[in-house]
Image: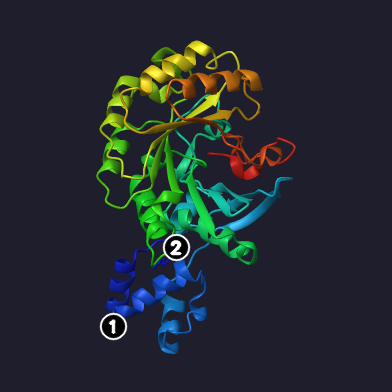
């Protein structure tokens, strides 16, 4: 029985099956997620006999930290080797997460799949293809391990962004199982205001997320101002074109404190013209509460170029002047390939690691 990734109810049921009081499951849950104890021997409020039994009949499987790449800005890119039982025998996989400290808070960018099947052409992760979905435990470990490693220096606020490798809404069950534990005050205990899931626009997933009572904030990776442009950059748009995606966004139920975020990667001479900005304004006009994050493209071995800062500023100004809040978001960790769109299991010299093969 794998304990990491299990809900409180699942752990209570497991303990009952062992003939133990159900509350022992709640104790294991608290130890795993609130106290970050990854060895049952450390859960000393359990009876010694139960700890011995759990040691033989259960496990807590953590990914191995293969490498840490430390940026000059303080960010750390983690390369994890996954160790999940039967899947790992035939499909060994690695994945990345990024820990980004800043004043008053830390942000952890986590992956939901090893590789990605969506194939956004400007993103290095797409070069990997989809290796496999991650389990809830593998998703949670990317939060728990950096928090434990940096516990002496943690700021009061932790932000979690599901923006690493993979498309979260194509691994919905495992992602939501992990998110519920992240958001549970009795689990990892992070506020929904500080957890954001980013999607390329998987409309059935957006509609399904809208029905969840416990959910993160939603960000839509837009990156284009019309269908022709988005088809060329993001093939998923051919399946869920902008009118369909915008309708799902219009119907998405926002909480009183919430806005819908749109991410727009600025690609020089492709999607960064003033007319693009005006089209984005028109596209978002029917929506209730939105903001746009303009993300300067992070270099990689792909046939794109960065937008000049003055063009990004002009784009931002057009949006703001027409009532659309817009912000420029410079990525952290660019020097160690930890920035947005750069997670492709690369060494610092740009060569792929041997673990990167999707085959």
Mark 2: secondary structure? loop
> Which residue, given by chain and number where applicable, does mark 2 sit on?
188
Assign the N terminus to one quadrant of the image: bottom left
Find residue 267 and report its horizontal and vertical position in percent: 57, 20
Mark 1: secondary structure? loop
Q: Nearer the viewer, residue 106 or 298?
A: 106
Direction from residue 180 to residue 66 in the image, left or right: right
Q: Quadrant of residue 291?
A: top left
Find residue 99 and report its horizontal and vertical position in percent: 60, 51
Total numbered labels: 2
Find residue 213 and report its horizontal and vertical position in percent: 27, 51
Query: Does residue 57 lie above or below 103 as drawn?
Result: below
Direction from residue 246 to residue 344 in the image, left or right: right
Q: Nearer the viewer, residue 280 or 234?
A: 280
In the rendered structure, find residue 19 and report the number of the disc placed on it. 1
The answer to whether residue 60 is seen in the rendering is yes
- Point 52% across, 57% down: residue: 157
């Amino acid at each position: 029985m794998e304990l990491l990734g299990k809900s409180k109810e699942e752990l209570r049921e497991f303990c009952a099956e062992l003939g133990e009081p159900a509350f022992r499951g709640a104790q294991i849950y608290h130890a795993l997620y609130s106290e970050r104890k990854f060895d049952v021997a450390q859960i000393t409020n359990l009876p010694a006999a139960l700890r011995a039994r759990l040691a033989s009949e259960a496990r807590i499987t953590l990914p191995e930290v293969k490498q840490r790449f430390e940026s000059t800005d303080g960010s750390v890119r983690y390369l994890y080797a996954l160790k999940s039982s039967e899947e790992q025998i035939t499909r060994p996989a690695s994945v990345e997460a990024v820990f980004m400290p800043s004043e008053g808070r830390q942000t952890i960018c986590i992956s939901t799949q090893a590789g990605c099947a969506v194939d956004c052409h400007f993103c290095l992760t797409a070069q990997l293809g989809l290796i496999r979905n991650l389990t809830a435990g593998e998703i949670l470990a990317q939060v728990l391990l950096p928090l434990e490693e940096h516990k002496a220096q943690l700021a009061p606020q932790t932000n979690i962004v599901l923006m690493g490798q993979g498309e979260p809404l194509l691994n919905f069950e495992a992602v939501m199982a992990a998110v519920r534990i992240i958001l549970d005050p009795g689990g990892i205990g992070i506020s929904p205001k500080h957890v954001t899931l980013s999607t390329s626009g998987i409309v059935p997933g957006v509609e399904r997320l809208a029905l969840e009572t416990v959910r993160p904030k939603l960000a839509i990776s837009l990156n284009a101002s019309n269908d022709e442009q988005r088809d060329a950059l993001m093939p998923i748009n051919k399946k869920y074109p902008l009118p369909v995606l915008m309708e799902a966004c219009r119907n998405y139920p926002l909480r009183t404190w919430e806005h819908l975020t749109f991410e727009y990667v600025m690609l020089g001479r492709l999607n960064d013209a003033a007319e693009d900005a005006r089209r984005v304004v028109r596209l978002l006009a029917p929506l209730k509460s939105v903001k746009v994050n303009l993300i300067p493209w992070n270099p990689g071995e792909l046939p794109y170029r960065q937008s000049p800062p003055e063009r990004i500023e002009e784009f931002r100004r057009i949006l703001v002047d027409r009532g659309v809040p817009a912000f420029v978001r410079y990525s952290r960790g660019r020097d160690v390939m930890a920035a947005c769109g750069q997670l492709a299991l690369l060494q610092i010299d740009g060569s792929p690691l041997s673990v990167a093969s999707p085959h």
